[in-house]
Image: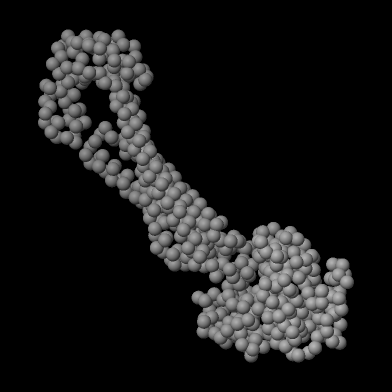
């Protein structure tokens, strides 16, 4: 579904935001993208959306090299990628229903399709009763549900989430994560950048950790682990460094096999 | 993908209304500048027609002394007959000449009052084989022929008049172009503000995969509407001023300017040109704004 081949991206006058990243994400996976601020998570998502193009390497989405896409095809790529953000990005002058319908209207879906799809997706996110409310009348969690509905209403192949729970309290966060999990179960690939140690450790999904633009860990059923600024994982489970991998930064849970994919990646990069 | 007409119309009207002060400024500037363009075009056509009219009828007028004797008139007539460049001549005696003077001077009663048939010079109105000879022929008759007061070739005065209208037209066009540029900038700025006001929507549209043209079209159309509205106002202004001038010419029976009243065909062409310029200004302004400020 998603593949990065030796992708490097730098902005002006800075060290690379992403440095020689290679990884693959299968259809239907749920992936956490973790790492401290400035580690390259957002750049990773922007490359997928083709808001940015890599300096080197290739990004594949749904079997297509998106660097090869001509500019006018980029919108069609984005129709396959739903997006949610920490700040929701709802339109304040439109109702919940209108906000969700907007996503379909502007890609030219006929009105009958819009009506049925919007009603369905609002039921899915649990806001079937609140379609006529304005965003400012809703709680933060409800607003994020509207954003999820808008991202998912067109049934994208991939849902990208950039710290979707950053503004939410723990209880609300759980609700959103349940929702994302339900969406993932429909076969939608979910890639979520997050700082939230709790949810990563509870969900036990694949974890990709970036540090200063480098891929330092790719672990199936992983935990948040510890970056340079953390000494223990939040749950207090002792983590064991994988011998020799990634300059000692990669960790694996005791008793859990290291992701086969990261091994493959290492092989490709000649890291032992 | 077909851009829904309903959506585009709704968006455009909403934008125009939200931005109405800028829209008004842009539309008025377009209207004023295009009125000047239209006026300049009509003036040029009117002057050209009128000049054509005059030069067809008469190329040379030989005024005789008011007290010229019969033999002097006869000798001037024979001199005219011997001049090969002159094809035809009509002689206006005192009474006819006075009648014509009254018509030409209709606007200034004091000048008429100063004239009597006896003091009005008689005149030969002549046509030449080619208007270009007018100056040389006039010079022959001005070289002290007895009884001749003065020979004038209207083409000289026409040339002066042409130069005056050329200058006038140039001034009008320069003002019009300056105003057109400022209306273009105003439209550009109006669209830029509309884009800024809708940056959230534009962001979401890009995110969910609206095509670039889908995002652009409402803004471009907004500029087009501003240009066309201004042009339509200019069309009305130009038509009204044309009606006004025609009415004045007819009302005061200024028959020498009779040909300056334009036929409908010329008017329609001019108005179409005005509308076309309005369309161009609107589309150009909004295209630049969309290209520079709408990052899609």
User: Is residue B161 found left or right of A231 in the rendered image?
Assistant: left
Which residue is found at the position 34% from the left and 25% from the top? B56
Q: Position of residue B59 (x, y in %)?
A: 31, 22
Q: Position of residue B152 (x, y in %)?
A: 26, 21
Q: Where is residue B93 in the image (x, y as percent from the top left)?
A: 18, 20
The answer to whether residue B49 is seen in the rendering is: no
Which residue is found at the position 59% from the left and 70% from the top? B204
User: Is residue B65 found left or right of A52 in the rendered image?
Assistant: left
Which residue is found at the position 11% from the left and 29% from the top? B114
Q: How is the image coloured?
A: one colour
* Residue A91 image-quadrant placement: bottom right
Q: Is residue B223 above or below residue B158?
A: below
User: Is residue B49 found left or right of B276 in the rendered image?
Assistant: left
Q: Quadrant of the N terminus of chain A?
A: bottom right
Q: Position of residue A258 (x, y in %)?
A: 85, 80
User: Is residue B159 found left or right of A153 in the rendered image?
Assistant: left
The answer to whether residue B39 is seen in the rendering is: yes
Work out whether residue A207 or residue A135 is closer to the camera in this orientation and state it.
A207
Q: Is residue B164 above or below residue B186?
A: above
Q: In this view, does B156 lie above or below A62?
A: above
* Residue A35 image-quadrant placement: bottom right
Q: How many marks?
A: 0
Which residue is found at the position 26% from the left and 39% from the top? B249
Work out whether residue A237 or residue B248 is closer to the camera in this orientation and state it.
A237
Q: Quadrant of the C terminus of chain A?
A: bottom right
Work out whether residue A11 or residue B122 is closer to the camera in this orientation and state it.
A11
């Amino acid at each position: 579904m998603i593949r990065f081949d030796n992708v490097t991206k730098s902005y002006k006058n800075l060290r690379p935001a992403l440095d020689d990243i290679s990884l693959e994400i299968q259809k239907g996976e749920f992936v956490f993208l973790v790492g401290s601020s400035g580690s390259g998570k957002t750049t990773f998502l922007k490359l997928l959306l083709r808001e940015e193009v890599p300096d080197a390497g290739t990004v594949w989405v749904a079997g297509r090299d998106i660097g090869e896409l001509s500019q006018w095809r980029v919108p069609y790529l984005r129709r396959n990628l739903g997006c949610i953000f920490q700040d929701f990005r709802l339109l304040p002058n439109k109702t919940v229903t209108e906000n969700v319908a907007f996503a379909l209207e502007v890609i030219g879906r006929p009105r009958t399709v819009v009506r049925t799809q919007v009603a369905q997706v609002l039921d899915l996110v649990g806001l079937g009763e609140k379609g006529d409310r304005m965003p400012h009348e809703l709680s933060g969690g409800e607003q994020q549900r509207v954003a999820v509905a808008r991202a998912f209403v067109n049934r994208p192949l991939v849902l990208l989430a950039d710290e979707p729970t950053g503004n939410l309290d723990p209880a609300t966060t759980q609700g959103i994560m349940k929702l994302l999990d339900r969406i993932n179960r429909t076969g939608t690939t979910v890639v979520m950048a997050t700082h939230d140690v709790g949810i990563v450790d509870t969900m036990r999904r694949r974890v990709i950790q970036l540090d200063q633009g480098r891929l330092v860990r790719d672990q199936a059923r992983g935990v948040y682990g510890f970056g340079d600024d953390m000494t223990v994982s939040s749950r207090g489970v002792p983590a064991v460094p994988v011998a020799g991998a990634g300059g000692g930064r990669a960790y694996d849970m005791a008793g859990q096999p290291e992701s086969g994919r990261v091994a493959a990646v290492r092989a490709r990069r000649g890291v032992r | 993908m077909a851009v829904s007409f309903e959506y585009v119309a709704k968006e455009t009207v909403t934008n125009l209304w939200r931005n109405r002060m800028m829209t008004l400024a842009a539309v008025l500037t377009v209207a004023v500048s295009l009125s000047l363009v239209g006026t300049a075009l009509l003036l040029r056509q009117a002057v050209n027609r009128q000049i054509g009219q005059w030069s067809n009828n008469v190329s040379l007028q030989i005024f005789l002394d008011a007290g010229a004797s019969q033999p002097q008139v006869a000798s001037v007539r024979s001199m005219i007959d011997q001049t090969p460049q002159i094809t035809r001549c009509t002689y206006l005696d005192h009474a006819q000449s006075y009648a014509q003077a009254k018509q030409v001077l209709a606007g200034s009663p004091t000048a008429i009052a100063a004239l009597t048939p006896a003091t009005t010079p008689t005149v030969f109105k002549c046509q030449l084989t080619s208007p270009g000879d007018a100056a040389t022929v006039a010079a022959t008759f001005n070289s002290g022929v007895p009884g001749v007061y003065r020979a004038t070739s209207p083409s000289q005065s026409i040339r002066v008049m042409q130069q005056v209208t050329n200058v006038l037209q140039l001034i009008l066009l320069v003002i019009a172009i300056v105003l057109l540029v400022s209306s273009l900038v105003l439209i550009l700025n109006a669209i830029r503000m509309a884009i800024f006001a809708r940056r959230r929507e534009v962001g979401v549209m890009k995110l969910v995969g609206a095509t670039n043209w889908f995002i652009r079209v409402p803004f471009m159309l907004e500029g087009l509407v501003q240009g066309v509205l201004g042009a339509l106002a200019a069309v009305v202004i130009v038509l009204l001023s044309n009606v006004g001038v025609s009415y004045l010419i007819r009302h005061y029976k200024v028959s020498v300017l009779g040909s300056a009243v334009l036929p409908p065909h010329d008017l329609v062409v001019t108005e179409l040109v005005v509308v076309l310029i309005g369309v161009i200004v609107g589309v150009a302004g909004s295209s630049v704004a969309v290209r520079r400020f709408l990052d899609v």
